[in-house]
Image (cartoon, rainbow, N blue to C red):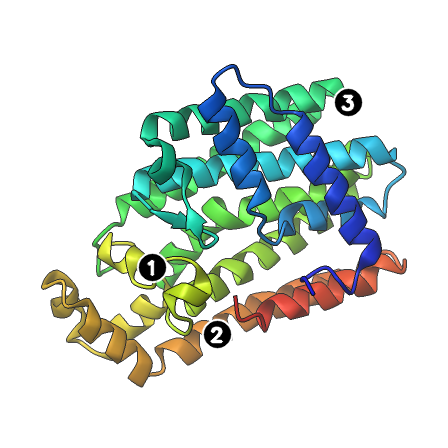
């Protein structure tokens, strides 16, 4: 059973997304080609294309355009993951070795760059106009600014929860926002597109907060990545920031690289509860906005999937 088993119509569409992404990859270098296809095959929840397909149910877009938009958003997401893994020197992603670990950083960078190109080519092939291409550029700029904001605050124990929310709004939530908004935007229903964007932004923020929460509640085998990797790299997510506020020893432990001590403080203060409460707050924001969507059957699925993300264990 997968995350999408309760939604067979969506599961079938996501299979079409997988097929379209695979068909879009034509790299002359065999290693780069294999690296990209291996990452596609490793899966993931496909949340961004799923939300795009769900919100496309409010539009009159042709099926091929819906699948193309969903494929483009997932390829864009995959490109950013590849580059992130190079920067982080990560050895695993989704429980499998990263492209940079298997093939080296050079192949990984080329693979990520190729996917950025493939995104635009796919949209052009399916006659998606320049305004949609502009949307992708805007999303990439906001995503990059989120990453740069996070980099600027590395090892900074004075940063706030507002700083954290601002950065994850770019590095994670922007693609969720685009995923929800792009089909209504392409359909010319701009008021709905703005509502969908706001819904997606709140979903994306809640998703990242829960991701950071799970870093400290799931072991690395379950989650598929080293539990303390971000802390070691000076990236302080919500649990660390709440622990900093709860115990004045945390800043010293971080400077001493005593990450086990920080981990224990996170476990024994209210840091995790506050993190989960923060994710719940943004989920509640999203659910409130979802009620404003047109009354179509898909609305209940959007509502349920958004609730399920808050309670996920992975």
Instruction: Please state the horizontal and vertical placement of residue 33, each as a whole percent of the image.
Output: 52, 25
Q: Vertically, is 101 above or below 275?
A: above
> Distance between the Cα atoms at labels 2 and 3?
41 Å
Q: Secondary structure at mark 2?
A: helix
Check residue 277 in the rendering and tell me which mark sits there, or answer none. Answer: none
| Residue linked to disc 1 | 226
Residue name at image x 61 percent, y 54 percent: 45
Residue 281, by quadrant, is bottom right
Q: Residue at x 32, y 80 (%)?
A: 267
Q: Position of residue 255 (x, y in %)?
A: 12, 61
Looking at the rendered image, the quarter that the N terminus falls into is bottom right
Q: CA distance from mark 1 to mark 2?
A: 20 Å
**Which residue is labeled 3 in the image?**
126
Residue at x 80%, y 48% (from the top left corner) = 12
Q: Position of residue 89 (x, y in %)?
A: 29, 42
> What residue lies at 80% left-to-right and 31% top-to-bottom?
65
Nearer mark to the viewer, of 1 and 2: 1
Visible residue check, residue 42: yes
Q: Is residue 226 left or right of residue 193?
A: left
Q: Residues within 10 Å of mark 3 (few under 14, many from 20)?
A: some
Choose the circle earlier in sequence order: 1 or 2: 1
Residue tagged 2: 276
- First along the sequence among labels 2 and 3: 3
Q: Mark 2: few, some, or many residues within 10 Å (few <14, many ≥20)?
A: many
């Amino acid at each position: 059973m997968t995350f999408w088993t309760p939604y067979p119509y969506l599961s079938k569409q996501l299979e079409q997304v997988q097929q379209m992404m695979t068909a879009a990859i034509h790299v002359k270098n065999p290693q780069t080609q294999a690296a990209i296809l291996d990452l596609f095959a490793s899966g993931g929840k496909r949340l961004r294309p799923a939300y795009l397909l769900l919100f496309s149910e409010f539009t009159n877009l042709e099926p091929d355009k819906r699948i193309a938009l969903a494929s483009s958003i997932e390829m864009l997401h995959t490109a950013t993951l590849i580059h992130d893994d190079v920067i982080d020197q990560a050895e695993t992603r989704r429980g499998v070795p990263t492209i940079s670990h298997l093939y080296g950083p050079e192949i990984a960078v080329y693979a990520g760059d190729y996917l950025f190109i493939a995104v635009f080519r796919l949209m052009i092939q399916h006659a998606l106009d320049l305004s949609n291409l502009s949307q992708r550029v805007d999303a990439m700029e906001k995503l990059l600014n989120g990453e740069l904001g996070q980099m600027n605050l590395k090892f900074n124990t004075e940063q706030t929860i507002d700083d954290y929310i601002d950065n994850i709004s770019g590095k994670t939530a922007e693609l969720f926002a685009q995923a929800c908004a792009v089909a209504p935007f392409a359909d010319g229903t701009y008021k709905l597109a703005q509502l969908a964007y706001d819904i997606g932004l709140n979903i994306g923020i809640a998703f990242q907060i829960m991701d950071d929460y799970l870093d400290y509640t799931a072991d690395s085998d379950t989650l598929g990545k080293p539990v303390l990797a971000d802390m070691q790299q000076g990236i302080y997510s919500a649990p660390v920031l709440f622990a900093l506020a709860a115990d004045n020893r945390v800043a010293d432990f971080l400077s001493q690289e005593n990450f086990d001590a920080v981990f224990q403080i996170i476990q024994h203060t209210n840091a995790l509860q506050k993190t989960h409460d923060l994710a719940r707050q943004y989920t509640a924001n999203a659910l409130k906005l979802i009620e404003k969507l047109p009354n179509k059957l898909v609305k209940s699925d959007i509502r349920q999937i958004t609730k399920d993300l808050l309670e996920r264990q992975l």
